[in-house]
Amino acid sequence: MAKTTPGEFVRQVRAESSKVVWPTRQETITTTIMVMIMMTILALFFLGVDSVFGWVVQSLLSLA
């Protein structure tokens, strides 16, 4: 594989970066809201799972 010169590397980087499509402000806001909703749902889910496991462990320890 041939080595790339620094000039060629810079040209390749510019060519690739010109292909980048940035999200619109609305897409960014929508995505942020969806992430926040999913984080809340998952936090509540894991709180419930942790509470159930905690209760089970406490119950088992009280038997010993």
Image: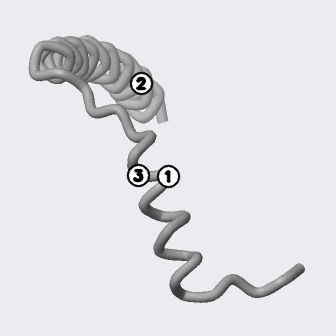
Which residue corresponds to mark 2? 53
For the residues labelled 1 and 3, the Cα–Cα distance comes to 4 Å
Q: Amino acid at mark 2?
A: Phe
Q: How many marks do you count on the picture? A: 3
> CA–CA distance between discs 2 and 1?
50 Å
Mark 2: which secondary structure?
A: helix
What amino acid type should be assigned to the residue bearing mark 1? Glu
Mark 2 vs mark 1: give the one in front: 1
Q: Amino acid at mark 3?
A: Ser
| Tag 1–tag 3 contact (CB < 8 Å) | yes
Q: Could you tell me which quadrant the N terminus lies in?
A: bottom right
Which quarter of the picture shows residue 25? top left
- Label 2 or label 1, whichever comes before in sequence order: 1
- Single out the residue that lies furthest toward the right: 1
Q: At x 35% / y 32%, what residue is drawn?
A: 21
- Disc 1: which residue: 16
Q: Residues within 10 Å of mark 3 (few under 14, many from 20)?
A: few
Which structural element holds mark 3? helix
Residue at x 76%, y 87% (from the top left corner): 3
Query: Mark 2 packing: few (<14 Cα in 10 Å), some, or many (20+)?
Result: few
Measured in 3D between alpha carbons, the distance from the residue under mark 3 to the one under mark 2, in whole angstroms, is 49 Å
Q: Quadrant of residue 22?
A: top left
Which residue is more in the foreground, 51 or 2? 2
For disc 1, the neighbor class at 10 Å (few under 14, some 14 to 19, many from 20) is few
Mark sitting earlier along the chain (3/2): 3
Direction from residue 11 to residue 43 in the image, left or right: left
Residue 58 percent coordinates (x, y):
35, 29
> Looking at the picture, how far across and down is residue 48, in whole percent?
30, 15
| Residue occupied by mark 3 | 17
Q: Position of residue 37 (x, y in %)?
A: 19, 12
Left or right of 56 on screen, residue 47:
left
| x 50%, y 68%: residue | 11
